[in-house]
DNA sequence: TGTACATCAGTGAACGCGCGTTCACTGATGTAC
DNA sequence: TGTACATCAGTGAACGCGCGTTCACTGATGTAC
């Protein structure tokens, strides 16, 4: 597996670091290789082109986040409690890596990884939909997609300050409380 | 007022048309002037640089949308009914111009207009907050900001198909029904 | 153990390309007298 | 009414720059015999 190669990792790590300050479209290969401490040609030893790299970067971020969420609710039955717990795991996970804004929000503007982002968002929406269904909501799939968008917005706000914001989370949960 | 000049308008209109198919970062000045039917130099007669143009483009879009929303609820008292009506006006307004995805969502990735987008989103959130306050929600400002994000997501979904989606709107409203 | 060859990550100069921006110039319209 | 000058939107060739990508080469490691 090529993803295990140290230089591959170094290039991905460099990208995640750069994405803390810049949007994906602003990150050039020059910047990436400089941050990773390798020559420009080395980039093309590990990635056929820039697009493939951006997809890999996004996948890396998303897989880690999804794993956190899935683990956090592994033993729970679908329902509002599981939705709470999943949301908290998601927000906490986003706070660990600061590249959230670029990868969660701005990634949607990158033609190169548009499809990938859409697929990944659908995964999260599907996870959430189970809970909305158990909670007896009408249109659980659509509610789930909207809820994911709302949670992503909350993550972007929190990453802005770098700290969990309990008032914000309370506001978020208010949208799913006392509903049919 | 320079915005009234026909060529200025033509350049903005060209941008709005191009934004239906591409994200803002992908739209080059070559494309803009070709779409507007003017020479490249003409662009710089009306805009000092690309950033200023993008801000003007976003402002144009936002002003129109805000006007629609404000007019739709002008005679109503704050509360859930006004929030419904404002949301519907917002979604209907987005369906008229197809550049929504670029200007609502992907615009946040553009360093050039980041601040502008933030200010505009805050305006919408402020409008919505009045209603959440009247509805007795805790954290009405934060709830409003999350709600705006959710509504923007709904707009992007609708513009994808080009048609209003009543199930989607029902799902959206479910988040604010039967709440304290 | 020693020699010859294969493999492959890594290097960095060089490439062509498209971009945003500049600028000297044109031509139509307005103003002064 | 006619002449001289000023103003200003519009033009398009030319610019320098940074980008993604290529490629001939290096050097270390592995393999065969």
Image (cartoon, coloured by chain):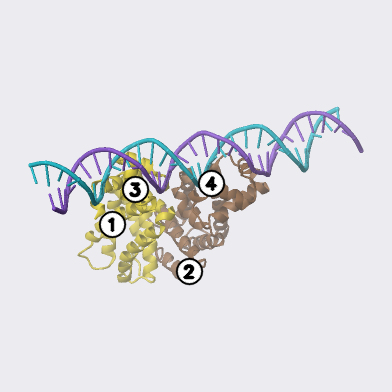
Chain colours: A brown, B yellow, C purple, D cyan
Q: Chain of mark 3?
A: B
Is residue A163 toward the left or the right of residue B145 in the image?
right
How crowded is the residue under tag 4: few (<14 C-alpha within 10 Å), some, or many (20+)?
many
Where, by quadrant of the figure, is residue B76 drawn? bottom left
* Residue in the picture at 23% in, 68% down: B77
Q: Is residue B175 visible?
A: no
User: Do discs 1 and 4 belong to a common subunit?
Assistant: no
Residue A75 versus residue C9 in the image, above or below: below
User: Do discs 1 and 3 belong to a common subunit?
Assistant: yes
The reply to whether the C-beta atoms of the residues labelled 2 and 1 are less than 8 Å apart is no
| Front residue (pair A158, C12) | C12
Q: Secondary structure at mark 4?
A: helix
User: Do discs 2 and 1 belong to a common subunit?
Assistant: no
Q: CA distance from mark 2 to mark 3?
A: 45 Å
Residue bearing the label numbered 3: B44
User: Do discs 3 and 4 belong to a common subunit?
Assistant: no
Residue B82 versus residue B21 in the image, above or below: below
- Tell me the mark number nearer the camera, choosing from 2 and 1: 1
Q: Secondary structure at mark 1?
A: helix
User: Do discs 4 and 2 belong to a common subunit?
Assistant: yes
Name the disc covering residue A165, or none.
2
Name the disc covering residue B63, or none.
1
- Tell me the mark number nearer the camera, choosing from 1 and 3: 3
Q: CA distance from mark 3 to mark 4?
A: 34 Å
Q: Secondary structure at mark 3?
A: helix
Q: CA distance from mark 1 to mark 3?
A: 24 Å
Is residue A49 toward the left or the right of residue B51 in the image?
right
* Residue in the picture at 33% in, 46% down: B43
């Amino acid at each position: 597996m090529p993803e295990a190669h140290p230089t591959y990792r170094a290039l991905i790590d460099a990208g995640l670091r750069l994405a803390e300050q810049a949007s994906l479209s602003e990150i050039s290969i020059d910047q990436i290789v400089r941050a990773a401490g390798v020559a420009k040609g080395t980039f093309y030893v590990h990635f056929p082109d820039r697009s493939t790299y951006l997809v890999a970067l996004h996948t890396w971020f998303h897989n880690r986040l999804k794993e956190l969420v899935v683990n956090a609710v592994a033993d729970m039955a679908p329902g509002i409690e599981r939705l709470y717990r999943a949301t908290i795991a998601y927000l906490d996970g986003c706070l660990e890596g600061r590249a959230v804004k670029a990868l969660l929000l701005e990634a949607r503007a990158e033609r190169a990884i548009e499809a990938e982002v859409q697929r990944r968002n659908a995964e999260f929406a599907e996870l959430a939909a189970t809970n909305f269904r158990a909670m007896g909501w009408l249109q659980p799939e659509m509610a789930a997609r909207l809820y994911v968008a709302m949670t992503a917005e909350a993550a972007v706000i929190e990453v802005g300050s770098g700290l969990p914001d309990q008032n914000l989370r309370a506001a978020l949960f208010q949208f799913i409380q006392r509903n049919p």
